[in-house]
Amino acid sequence: MAGVNVTEAILAARRLTKIVPNGRSTLTILHDIDLQVMPGEVLGIIGASGSGKSTLLALLAGLDHPSAGSVTLDGVDLAGLDEDGRAAVRSRLVGFVFQAFQLIGSLTALENVMLPLELQGRLAMSAIRERAVALLRRVGLAERLQHSPRLLSGGEQQRVALARAFVVEPRILFADEPTGNLDAATGAEVISMLLALNEEHGTTLVIVTHDEAVAARCDRVVRIVAGCLA
Ligand SMILES: Nc1ncnc2c1ncn2[C@@H]1O[C@H](COP(=O)(O)OP(=O)(O)OP(=O)(O)O)[C@@H](O)[C@H]1O
Ligand SMILES: [Mg+2]
């Protein structure tokens, strides 16, 4: 996307670098990453294991902070915020989907989806419940509202995780190998649902994947090689 107007990007990373201590020296995990993502875009991030994809996603989403460089998310410069400030931005703007689903085992499917809205504290419980039920219906789990995650299949758990991610109407959604724990057919279904929800909700998607079938369905794919954009 040469010539992109950075001011229009919903997500912009500039010279993003992550260096961690490594014994008596240091290890550069990411080096000088420049990246812009436009509203509504579906961006795939691919690269070998250990190349820095999850580290990059964590920095872009404000879960981690860089050693150098900056991230601007929906016009907010994350560098200017402390951990509480970044948490507030994540809660308002960002959704996540993880490889291992990361549902809370002691809560039902419905309670898992309600939780992010409860934490926001902006809607009445009845409205929260209504939105969570509608999303669980949308992902085909109307009959599983009271199920514990451990009684759900992997594909069903990931669909609950999709409902949980979209329930806050995020501006941008980050997914780290969302099909990594699923068989090919189930993974393809989950990606179809993720892309459909992304379009319906007018969200922007950044997906880390090893899965060529997932990469093929992204609008654009970037590759990380040893911490650098290839
Ligand atoms: N906090 C840390 N301290 C030291 N090394 C780290 C830290 N976080 C990540 N690394 C190292 O940085 C490299 C990149 O890790 P990262 O998890 O981003 O890779 P990845 O591309 O997501 O790999 P995978 O495809 O296996 O998930 C790895 O070599 C990892 O061991
Ligand atoms: Mg990873």
Image (cartoon, grey):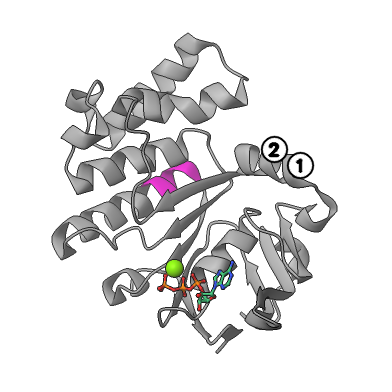
Q: Answer above or below: position of 11 versus 138.
A: below
Residue denoted by label 1 = 85
What amino acid is labelled 1 in the image?
A: Gly
Disc 1 and disc 2 in contact, CB within 8 angstroms: yes
Residue denoted by label 2 = 88
Q: Residues within 10 Å of mark 2 (few under 14, many from 20)?
A: some
What amino acid is labelled 2 in the image?
A: Ala
Q: Does the magenta stretch include residue 223?
A: no
- Which of 105/206 is in front? 105
Q: How far is mark 1 from mark 2, CA to CA? A: 5 Å
Q: Is residue 199 magenta?
A: yes
The magenta stretch is 197-202
Q: Residue furthest right?
A: 80
Q: What element carries label 1?
A: helix
Give residue 71's position: percent from left, percent from top. 73, 63
Mark 2 C-beta closer than 8 Å to ligand 1:
no
Query: Could you tell me which residue is drawn at 52 percent across and 62 percent down?
Result: 41
Q: How many marks?
A: 2
Q: How crowded is mark 1: few (under 14 residues within 10 Å), some or many (20 or more)?
A: some
Snapshot quadrant of residue 114:
top left
Give residue 54's position: percent from left, percent from top. 50, 66
Image quadrant containing the C terminus: bottom right
Give residue 103's position: percent from left, percent from top. 36, 38
Q: Answer above or below: position of 120 versus 192.
A: above
Query: Could you tell me which residue is drawn at 24 percent across and 28 percent down?
Result: 148
Q: Which residue lies furthest to the front in this view?
A: 24
Query: Could you tell me which residue is drawn at 26 percent across and 42 percent down?
Result: 157
- Which of 122/104 is in front? 104
- Which of 194/87 is in front? 87
| Left or right: 210 as drawn, with respect to 37 | left
| Left or right: 97 as drawn, with respect to 145 | right
| Left or right: 218 as drawn, with respect to 83 | left
